[in-house]
Image (spheres, grey):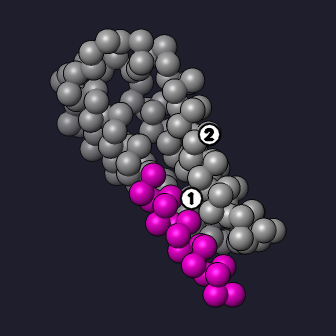
Amino acid sequence: MIKRILLFTAVLVFLFILSYFTNTYLVKEMTISFSLLNVYVFHVLAALVVYAIVEFIADILPNQAGYAYLASIFIKIGLFVLIFNASVFSKENLSRPERVSLVVPLFLFLITEAVAISKLLNNKQFN
């Protein structure tokens, strides 16, 4: 279990480094009204917490791990809205680079955690 969490952490750190620096390079001459670093750090930490929760629930109650994943995704989205409400959602019209800079890390880390959790749950199902 710890080995899988550490491997998932390494994948998240690699994706963070690759995508964050690519994103900052692409929008370096444009002004963004929010901290891009904070958005990426939030998604990395949230994905790690969601994976760890599902990992622990899958060990205790394997049949309920999918529900834990769904609940944690809703909590993650709610926390994002609460934390970034003043800097992201207070502005009426976001520019295209700002919108892309919000959506890319969301889907990148959401897809990564969904793939990892699906592999975890498939392995738990057959064990």
Asked if the stretch drawn in magenta spans residue 126, the answer is: yes
Specify the label residue 75 is tagged with.
2
Q: Nearer the viewer, residue 47 or 126?
A: 126
Q: Would you call the spot at circle 2 few (<14 residues within 10 Å), some (14-19), or many (20 or more)? A: some
User: For numbered disc 1, what is the local secondary structure?
Assistant: helix
Q: Answer above or below: position of 62 versus 107.
A: below
- Looking at the rendering, the stretch of residues picked out in magenta corresponds to 110-127
Q: Main secondary structure of the magenta part?
A: helix
Percent x, y for residue 121? 60, 73
Residue occupying image coordinates x 59% and y 73% = 120
In the rendered view, does 72 fall on the left or right side of 19? right
Q: Nearer the viewer, residue 104 or 2?
A: 104
What amino acid type should be assigned to the residue bearing mark 1? Answer: Thr
Percent x, y for residue 3? 66, 72
In the rendered view, does 110 fall on the left or right side of 19? right
What amino acid type should be assigned to the residue bearing mark 2? Answer: Ile
Task: Assign the N terminus to one quadrant of the image.
Answer: bottom right
Residue occupying image coordinates x 35% and y 12% = 91
Cα distance, mark 1 to mark 2? 20 Å
Which residue in the structure is indicated by mark 1? 9
Report the residue that reaches farthest toward the bottom.
Answer: 127
Q: Confirm whether residue 21 shows in the render.
A: no
Question: In the rendered picture of this protein, how many numbered marks are placed on residues?
Answer: 2
Residue occupying image coordinates x 62% and y 39% = 75
Q: Quadrant of residue 34?
A: top left
Specify the label residue 92 is tagged with.
none
Percent x, y for residue 68? 67, 56
